[in-house]
Image (cartoon, grey):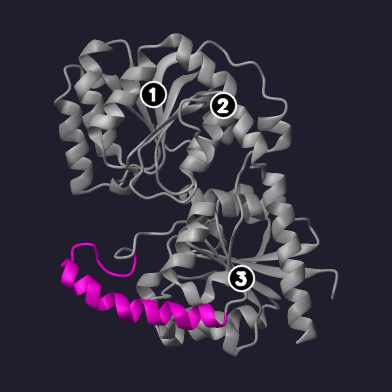
Amino acid sequence: MKTRRTIALCLEYPLGQMGGMEVLVQQLALGFPETIDLVLVSKDRSLAEVPIDYRHRFKAHFYWSPEDASPFVARTLVENLRQAGVDLVHFHLGGNYSWETHKFWHCPVFYCRRKKMPYLLTTHKVFPVLMGYSKPWRWVSSRVLLLAKAWLSRAIILRNTPLELTVSKHDAQAMKRIFPPWRTRFRHLYHSRLSLTNGLENAPTSPPRQKVILCAGTVCELKGHHVLLRAFTRIAPYYPDWTIELVGRRDEGPFQKELDRLIAALPNPKQIRYAGVISDFALLRDRFRTAAICVQPSLVEGLGLAIQEALSLGCPAIGSDVGGIPEMIKSGLNGLLVPANNVEALAAALNRLMGDDELRQKMGRAAPAEIQRLRMTREDMISQYLEIYDSLLAKAQAA
């Protein structure tokens, strides 16, 4: 095996969009050794659109957008990667049917096998059975009919896929249930941007915590912000000195109008603050150090980086019992778990923590231990990927 390798990191979004998947791909790009040359495939039109902090790590870039997908576009992308000298292609999927895997003839993964290019998949979020492969506004009966086609297409991809990673144990088990003939292809690998040098073993003493509930993540329906605001509406009059801070990119449209309506209905709308996107990780960590509670009320989740980062800094968390969140929150010990999309349960959990300073402090002291135990660190993520790359390339050379 040659010492220098070229790896293609592939995602369907602009690298600077700052969703969880983009953040983790950024960490891989910066963390891999210089003996690995990187090629980026993304929705950025060119490397000039990639944030300057990461641009230098890529020797080439190819554009990909699912809106433009076709058999010709998919084959062309794979041929371009082959001509660029890529040794292994690493596809990052935002959902279990991303990268057009529900239409295999539109999917570059399918053509990698035909070109004998080694590859692997990382799926960052596993949707429920009837989601992720069809427009959400379709009738349920239509989605049921389309499911068979989507499942068979994904099965064709899986049949030739040596390994597919998920970001939580929950999602690995979910994929095994959805695609039982290929259950041995799935395993989990915890992802993180926490470093042993900045977050887990040497966390500085936190300053006094403010009466702030921090909710970090793209402001959209799947993240459950409407559930949070409805829950807060029920208890806000009893806590006039508390605020919710929303950190992340806002999805404009009908959902945002619904959130604005919920905020306007509060006795004091100023209790909700939009902080926007915080791309500087150090600044975001400062928010977690000073917030009293972190909340992630997701309806669907892969792992939950905000929960991971909050707990690592001693901030107790409330999270939905979906995805990998229950793998980090031990309810009653370092935070509270609530059923997804349950306004009453979330309101009760918020009321319990907001009204009990001693309980918050106790949970905050216990919070980092679980993240340490699970070894959710950037260093572990990168070292495991390097081992996987070596293994897949060795098998490809031996074939």
* Residue 161 spot, x, y in % from top left: 58, 77
Question: Does the magenta run of residues contain 149?
Answer: yes
Location of residue 212 in the rendering, given as x and y in whole percent from the top left corner: 40, 19
Q: Is residue 168 visible?
A: no
The C terminus sits in image quarter = bottom right
Q: Nearer the viewer, residue 394 or 219?
A: 394
Q: Secondary structure at mark 3?
A: loop
Which residue has dot 3 on it?
Answer: 163
In this orientation, does residue 46 appear? Answer: yes
Residue 302 lies left or right of residue 129; in this view the side is right
Q: Residue 18 at x, y = what percent?
A: 48, 47
Disc 3 marks a residue whose amino acid type is Leu
Q: Residue at x 68, y 68 (%)?
A: 7
Question: Label 3 neighbourhood size at 10 Å, few (<14), some (14-19), many (20+)?
Answer: some
Q: CA distance from mark 1 to mark 3?
A: 39 Å
Q: 209 or 340, which is in the foreground?
A: 340
Q: Earlier in the sequence, mark 1 or mark 3?
A: 3
**How many marks can you see?**
3
- Range covered by the magenta-colored residues: 132-160
Residue corresponding to mark 1:
213
What percent of the width, then of the height, locates residue 270? 26, 19
Inspect the image, locate mark 2, and give the three-letter code of the amino acid beneath it. Ala
Local secondary structure at mark 1: strand
Name the residue that disc number 2 marks: 367
Q: CA distance from mark 2 to mark 3?
A: 32 Å
